Amino acid sequence: MCHTVIDMPPDTATRLRQLRIEKKATQDDVAAAVNVDRSMISKMEKGKPGGREVVIRLADYYGVSLDWLLAGDGARTPQIASNLPPSEIELLNAFRKIPPDEAVAFFMLMVAASKRK
């Protein structure tokens, strides 16, 4: 498994702390839920890099979308669209089969490409 690190921009660190406070959870609670040390949660909330797998687990734990957590883009909560064309459904289903550590890299690539003009 790849243990790639994701930089935590200040806004992402702020969102992580905000989510934890909204959930009325301690850093120990969050750490236990996503299977890391409390120090990792503390570091990420201060803007230090975190592992891709941890970021995915945090998004799942808080029930937020990765794009919102990492970049503040899109809907805060994951949306399920029932009116997607077949090609987009196929893409989504393929994406869901990618291992989590690779999915974040692919996702970040797609976000960056979509912002090019």
Image (spheres, helix red, strand yellow):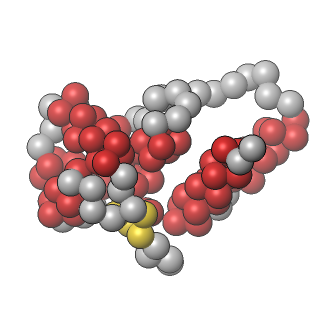
* Residue 72 seen in the current view: yes
Q: Which of 77 and 7 is in front in this view?
A: 7
Q: Nearer the viewer, residue 67 or 53?
A: 67
Instruction: Tell me: 89 left or right of 5.
Output: right
Furthest residue to the right?
Answer: 86
Q: Quadrant of the C terminus?
A: top right
The residue at the point 27 percent across, 35 percent down is 19
Percent position of residue 21, x then y? 18, 33
Residue 58 against residue 88 in the figure, above or below: below
Furthest residue to the top?
Answer: 83
Residue 87 against residue 109 in the figure, above or below: above
Residue 48 against residue 72 in the figure, above or below: below
* Residue 99 seen in the current view: no
Percent position of residue 56, x then y? 44, 53
| Residue 87 occupies quadrant | top right
- Please state the total of marks drawn on the protein image: 0
The residue at the point 78 percent across, 47 percent down is 91
The residue at the point 36 percent across, 52 percent down is 9
Percent position of residue 43, x then y? 20, 60
